[in-house]
Image (tube, rainbow, N blue to C red):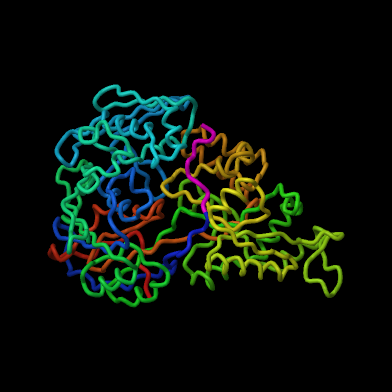
Amino acid sequence: MKKLRWQLLIIFLTGLVVSILLLIEQPEAPAPVGSTPEPVRGGVYTEALVGSLQRINPFLATNNSVDRDLSQLIFNGLVRFDARGAPQPDLAEIWGISEDGTLYNFTLKGDLLWHDGQPLTAEDVLFTIDVIRAGGSLVPEDLKAFWEEVEAVQLSERDIQFRLPEAFSPFLDYLSFGVLPKHLLEGKTVDTMVDDPFNLAPVGSGAYRFDRVLTEDGQITGVALMAFEQYYGTKPYIEELVFRFYATPEAALQAYRNSEVQGIGEIPGELLAESLSEPNLSIYTARLPRTAMVLFNVKSTDAPFLQDENIRKALMLGLNRQGMIDRILNGQAILADGPILPGTWAFYDGLATYEFDRDAAAEMLRKAGYSLVNEEDTVLSNEGDYLQFTLLYPDTDLHRQLAEYIQTNWLALGVQANLEAQPYDELVTERLVDRTYQAALVELNLSGSPDPDPYPFWDQAQATGGQNYSQWDNRMASEYIEQARVTADLTERAKLYRGFQVVFHDEMPALPLFYPVYSYGVDREIEGVRIGPLFDPSDRFAYITEWYLPGLQENAAPATTEAVPTQP
């Protein structure tokens, strides 16, 4: 199972969104003395989504944000993950892990029901796993291969045992898939489900059930969901959710201004200022599960100096990352310090930040033997070996700006980064996979994968043929992440990942730049809204059952929220 992670390293996506200006919200008028905030059930919340409906099916929703949002509300997995990435029971009531980490016993909650009233049992879970095993054009091969190696056995109507060929602590990550109803889809594969009517009238087990499609002039313009009265978890306060579809973010913002909707599913950076000017719109921000970085090929024979950790550290110190965020991204990202996402159980916050310090960077390069050959030279040299290399970047305008900013910063040190734009596919599948590069502006993407598991990107075993494109070869770091992969206890795993992060910080095989963030708008009329770090934008609905409309109650004080709305 050493190669079972199916998330891919992807290039930093364009259109970074959201503000990180988390300022304190202006206080609401105080509630009358003696009032008690008791939300009542009822009301309708309407949200604008950019895009169109295709298929409300968790296995067909990967590439469509509208479908993912709706699937998140309608379907459930055995487990879910909280904002820290820690596993929590969902359909499962409890689970246990054998001492050797190869057996997982799960017990489902009692009286689970599908939205059509049929019981949800262990048979549905095993049926869904069989659908994954059957594969198809829409099932990643690595995911299919993973489940082919895991034996799933039904012990009773509520009990399931998973038997792994070897210990693999990120296994719970693979149990958050949306369970499908066997009684409605038996005999079908993912490929044959593509055109199934089920996708436009889905039956799930979540807090909200599908109610109807909204149409206008024969076109689907939205979807309505209703609270599921027999939901096994906390019953939602808001009775009906309506999602309306718009072609552009600008149209979604205008719909809010026209009072057609009360929320905006995503506010891109270019509309942030306009959105902040709306007096009744609260903007919430959250970290996305991606890390932008400069990746080095530390085995490059064309740039052997990249093997020197002091050179890499000097390049980090000489890069004004906060300036990059402020000037190019309009402040809409969070400074990154390592490969583990902040706010998660595995993140270690005890490491010093590499602050921009051009003088310290220049001194490190001088100690490494680099200096200007003569007054006319602008690039440092060490006995005729010039400090220059090629930096690849995705062929977009945004990435060009980022790459040029990096180039300018390093040239001030006497380091020449020659820029080369590459189409996304070629950069990944040819240059990174073949290790025919010196440095590259990339992004590690852990979307939908709360378990940190840095093994695929940084372990020695992945340096050849795997996703360790930097070819970083550090035995101590590898031992930490290998041991963490077979240790079930989160506390012990956190200690191991702390050791890994210390080694990474000391050697800097790649330069972490920033974590992109996500922006979400909800009218101040809606109370109880909170949002934590995201593993997918659809996770903004993690606490949807707590939302309510205060106009439906008497003498209620405003509810407190975990995330503080951004103010102009």
Where residue 108 sits, quadrant-wise, is: top left
Residue 114 picture location, percent across and down: 19, 39
Relative placement, left or right, of 269 versus 548 is right
Residue 249 picture location, percent across and down: 34, 68
Indicate whether 532 appears above or below 523.
Answer: above
Residue 329 picture location, percent across and down: 50, 69
Indicate whether 333 appears above or below 299.
Answer: below
| Camera-side residue of 21 and 147 | 147
Relative placement, left or right, of 311 versus 565 is right
Instruction: Count the numbered circles shown.
Output: 0
Could you tell me which residue is drawn at 65 percent across and 64 percent down? 419
| Camera-side residue of 514 and 354 | 514
| Camera-side residue of 298 and 189 | 189
Residue 387 picture location, percent across and down: 77, 61
Where residue 78 sits, quadrant-wise, is: top left
> Is the magenta region chiefly helix, strand or loop?
loop
Indicate whether 230 appears above or below 364.
Answer: above
Whether residue 317 is in magenta: the answer is no
The residue lying furthest to the top in this view is 155
Relative placement, left or right, of 126 versus 469 is left
The residue stretch that appears in magenta = 1-10
Where residue 318 sits, quadrant-wise, is: bottom right
Query: Which quarter of the rendering shows the C terminus?
Result: bottom left
| Camera-side residue of 452 and 561 | 452
